[in-house]
Image: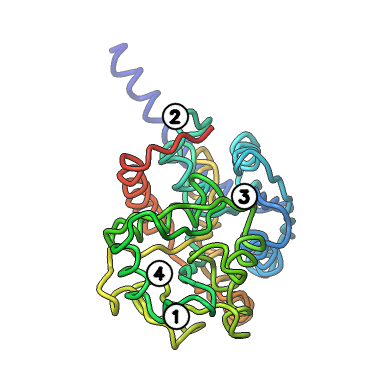
Amino acid sequence: MTVMKNLKQCYLGAIIFAMSAVVQAQVWPSKPLNLIVPFPPGGATDILGRVLSESLPSKLGQPAVVENKPGGSTVIGVMAALRAPADGYTVLVSASSSFVVLPALRSNLPYDVEKDIYPINLSVTTPLVVVTSADKPYMKLADLIAQAKAKPKSLRYTSYGPGTTPHLATEIFAGAAQIDVEPIPYKGSSDSILALMRGDADFGLETIAAAGAQIKAGKLRALAVTSPSRSRFLPEVPGLDELHLPAANFEVFYGVALSASVPKPIANKFAKAVSEAMNTPEVKERMSAQSLEISNKGPEAMAAFMKAEITRFKTLNKRLNIQLE
């Protein structure tokens, strides 16, 4: 009898908890949302956050405010989002670095991406573009690969340091092309693009937004984009399937997440609102202006993509042995 009574109490408790979560979702949101961006203002992640802060109020009926919390390779901002009350009012807007790169390469990360984070929306993506100085002799990607194979480790590429996007993307490309190249570290895209234009480095992998102006000005030559097909932002530049290098595919993504402790009815209501916002003509136009492609993948698709990317980077790190702190 005692066992049956306990079972009934547990069952009743579960029903009450479920009903409470549904009621919470019905009244949520009743106050402004805080969108935490773990980067400084101005970059693609910040732009996504601000676009959402302007488009979500019409979907949810409450303001949404961006709070930039850079530092610690995005860990400071991520932890601020995860330590906030799990009521759906604190949102993480971040990039590949938080969702897949750090979880794959850093052993002492203070969060478990699979247990602590609930993916909401893989919002936008961008391929990188392989660029070289217009004064270099490489007219197409095959020329660069041929030179690298003829003289291993003779070609140098721009990097922002171990584990950064250009470093990982270039090493994935090098593995697919079976070449051995050497990184030169720079502080960021501005410094690396200047170095490429000067010819200090042989090539680099940069975002279209960062390199596009110099490509159009004829100071940099675009050899390929790191997506399977051509990008509409650089339609004259071949994609990797066309160049028979599908294994080198690399697209940076930016997305939205909540703490995994947020009640699922609230999380799902928020996911629906974000998806609707990303599908509006205004958001599509603003993302396009930044050379960002709308992806708009929901929780399940984002989680599956993250899992595959983490596996990919862990495999890559067996060769590179990157030690991130």
Q: Which one is closest to the eye, mark 1 or mark 2?
A: 1
Question: Horizontal and vertical percent for residue 14?
Answer: 42, 33
Mark closer to the chain start, 4 or 1: 4
Q: Disc 4 designates what residue?
A: 226
**Quarter of the figure that contains the C terminus:** top right
Q: Nearer the viewer, residue 315 or 189?
A: 189
Point out the tag, 4 or 2, that comes first from the N-terminus: 2
Q: Tell me the kind of residue under disc 1.
A: Ser
Marked residue nearer the N-terminal end (1 or 2): 2
Which residue does the numbered mark 2 point to in the structure image? 13
Element at label 4: loop
> How far, Cα to Cα, is label 1 from label 2?
53 Å
Q: Nearer the viewer, residue 34 or 265?
A: 34
Q: Which residue is mark 1?
A: 231
Labels 1 and 2 touching (C-beta < 8 A):
no
Task: Calculate the distance from the C-alpha at mark 2 to the C-alpha at mark 3.
Answer: 29 Å
Q: Quadrant of the N terminus?
A: top left
In the picture shown, does residue 254 fall above or below 261? below
Residue at image point 56% right, 77% down: 220
Can you say whether 262 is above or below 302 in the image? above
- CA gap between label 3 and label 4 equals 30 Å
Taking the image as shown, residue 144 lies to the left or right of residue 67, namely: left
| Foreground label between 4 and 1 | 4
Residue placed under numbered mark 3 in the picture: 91
Q: Please name which of the two marks, 2 or 3, marks the residue nearer to the observer.
A: 3
